[in-house]
Image: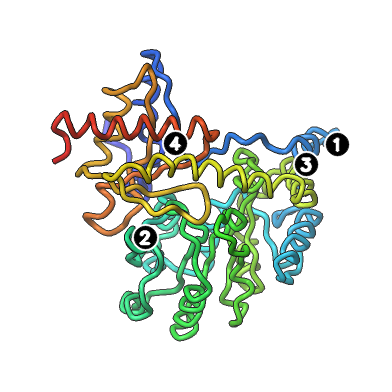
Amino acid sequence: MERLYLSKRGIEIEASPIRKLVPFAEEAKKRGIEVYHINIGQPDIPTPPFILDAMRAFSNPVLPYGPSQGLLELREAISEYFRRYGVEINPCEIFITTGGSEAIYFAFLTTMDAGDEVLIPEPYYTNYNGFANMAGVRIIPIPTDAAHGFHLPDEEVIEKLITPRTRAILICSPNNPTGTVYTEKEYERIKKIAEKHNLYIISDEVYREFIFNGTEPFSILKLDTEPERLIVIDSISKRFSACGARIGFIATKNRKILANVLKYGQARLCPPTIEQYGAIEGYKRLDEFLPEMIEEYKRRRDAAFEVIDKTPDIFALKPDGAFYAVLKLPIKDADHFARWLLSDFNVDGKTVMVAPARPFYRSENKGSDEVRIAYVLESHRMKEALQILVKGLYEYIKSGHRL
């Protein structure tokens, strides 16, 4: 039988690099090894019970389709949420999506045609690659480096990357995977470039409140520029510790963008209905759980860096936000190291799973000596996980794998 055709698009989309080591972790567990998962941003902090209670309270005898743009009550709750940051946005300027992932994909589809380009500081969230591929969009990386805390380069460096096909700049602050929090000057730099070259600014603000350096949470919707060029991507996954709820949203004052997003949204009919009721309760009662959640992540970060800062062969600047850090290691192949930790190493029956950083880069020859960790375990477990990682690193080098 002649082989059936498979689309080039499907073949070229990368499998999740964050999850590709799962088989190695499963094999380790079968051997009785306990695996500390610091490879993925899956919080272990309990979802606030009143969010779950709001979902359980759904009593309609029929679970119907909802509006493609999401429940009005949720959009009103999000509108009220933005007021705490001095942002006025109408509920009709908010579109509920199936997680932040769909929001990013819709933003690409509505601002760019196939072959167009988006600038993104690297390293960046790996799934941007898949969304760009599905939309036929080309990612152009903006270079950053660990020595400068992964902050943005000078204006001239960014402008050299702009071509006639550039349509947008996508930023994420606090950042996944680096934990970097952009400064006011960096936001102004991006705004100036976007105005000069007539670009959209797409801002992934999933970790908005996860800041540990005293900086106030910020949204690009506060920038003094044409509001039509500003598109915010957000999600309840991390803020409410509700990754499985799959509730995100797009917020923009650009009504033409929203009209086109609605067309894409109608193709999947509506976002999850019951989970939206949980999100409504979460936004209304944010102050009851979010401040302590942020303090808990700060404690976890500090526990991890208590070990990292004492290890001269690991370079990493303590991140100011989110719950990730990129560690530069004295090895050449972090992907091999990550597999080796799961297949060949343990300390008293325990090992760690990390995310190799190479897939977070678009540029060649970057990230091969780096790993991303997520400090999503309780402080004492986080500290133990890093101690195991350090022991593994030196055993790996001692075994002749360094070069």
Q: Secondary structure at mark 2?
A: strand
Residue that numbered label 1 is attached to:
60
Q: Is residue 191 above or below residue 220?
A: below
Q: Callout 3: 10 Å neighbours few (<14), some, many (20+)?
A: few
Mark closest to the chain's N terminus, 3 or 2: 3
Q: Secondary structure at mark 4?
A: loop
Mark closest to the chain's N terminus, 4 or 1: 4
Mark 1 or 2: in front is 2
Label 2 sits on what residue type?
A: Glu
Q: Callout 4: 10 Å neighbours few (<14), some, many (20+)?
A: many
Residue that numbered label 4 is attached to:
38
Label 4 sits on what residue type?
A: Ile
- Marker disc for residue 233: none
Residue that numbered label 3 is attached to:
64
- Marker disc for residue 122: 2
Quote the CA–CA distance across marks 4 and 1: 40 Å
Label 1 sits on what residue type?
A: Asn
Q: Is residue 334 above or below residue 136?
A: above
